[in-house]
Image (tube, rainbow, N blue to C red):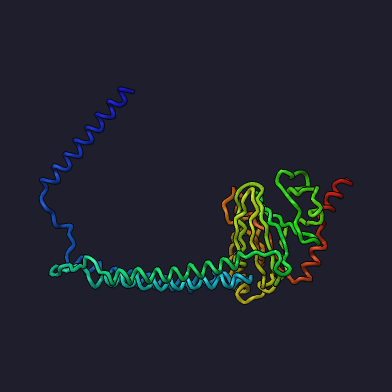
Amino acid sequence: MTVFLTLVVIALFGITLWQMSKILKLSQAKTDNSQVANDKDNNLQGKLMLAFVIFLYLLTIYCFVQYDSYFLPESASEHGVDYDRLMLISMVLIMIVQILTQGLLHFFSYKYRGKKENKALFFADNDKLEFIWTIIPVIVLAGLIIYGLFTWTDIMNIDEEDGDPLIVELYAYQFDWRARYSGEDNELGKANVRYIEGINTLGLDVSDTYGKDDKITNELHLPVNRKVIFKMRSQDVLHSAYMPFFRAQMNVVPGMITEFAYTPTVTSDEMRDSEFMVEKVATINKIRREKSKKLVAAGDEALEEYTFEYYLLCNKICGVSHYNMQMKIIVESEEDYKAWLKTQPTFGEQLSAQASN
């Protein structure tokens, strides 16, 4: 250890001498003005700044026009209207500030470019300017935050006694989802991952009578224009229930139940037949057909035609198959929903079938 420390000291001493020699050379060097910008350089840089901001604006316009098909359609949930309005207000304000500040920055870079005969004029401080550029952002941001808080409070105001909400559990595990519907009592039975065994893949408490009429499915069916309260559980790691068309997302945390609620307003068929989605699906299928030709030419199978469906996705990177963790959502009329639900076996019926076997 002593030898090692000695070597370190010698190395540091050598570095010190090297740095001192560089400082000595700098002190003896003659002034070289060849790298100092002259009027020609400043004119060029000023014009380049103007050209860049014009290019930036044109690129922004092009992206909005060219890639508008990547935007989501109007929200398919009741609360999503307020969510989209808040997002639109935020984006408009950001774009206004961005256009003004970028334009002024690049224009001033050109207007006040360096000139040999000019001398810089500056103010050490200006209380009025400082007040203006401080108070305006404070007022705008305060307004956005307050509006956002009221919107968030309305969205997260989950009241099971309000109307006749549908209670659904979303159960996440690597790498799939399951939905559990409360039965006639509209109350989910108790569950815990410690009870997972055999067909009881969600860990329902078999001694809890409320859970006997619960129905477990691998598709999520929702009645249109009826409030749905989601209670979310995770079996293993952190997941995130993400339903972009409904403007809904909530973390699914191991060891606790998280909640989110919304009211679907557009059925799957209505969204599928909307002008926006018809155009989008046609574009996607055109791309898929081109890709299919290449796959067939290479000896692979052609891609199937794309058909729009709502999906529940995981928006947390939860493992190697995270990208494939999804469940189809079908929004339909109340009558169709009830007819589908009747065809699903209850947990009690599944237990009885297992016992008889």
Q: Which of the pair 61/15 is nearer the observer?
A: 15
Q: Which residue lies furthest to the right in this view?
A: 356
The total number of labels drawn is: 0
Q: Where is residue 70 in the image (x, y as percent from the top left)?
A: 54, 68
Asked if residue 102 lies left or right of residue 311, the reply is left
Q: Quadrant of the N terminus?
A: top left
Q: Residue at x 18, y 62 (%)?
A: 37
Asked if residue 262 lies left or right of residue 113, the reply is right
Q: Which of the pair 235/51 is nearer the observer?
A: 235
Q: In this orientation, does residue 207 appear?
A: yes
On screen, residue 277 above or below 342: below
Q: Residue furthest bottom?
A: 275
Asked if residue 333 lies left or right of residue 46, the reply is right
Q: Which residue lies furthest to the front in this view?
A: 161
Q: Which residue is drawn at 65% across and 67% down?
A: 262
Q: Where is residue 123 in the image (x, y as percent from the top left)?
A: 21, 68
Q: Where is residue 129 in the image (x, y as percent from the top left)?
A: 29, 71
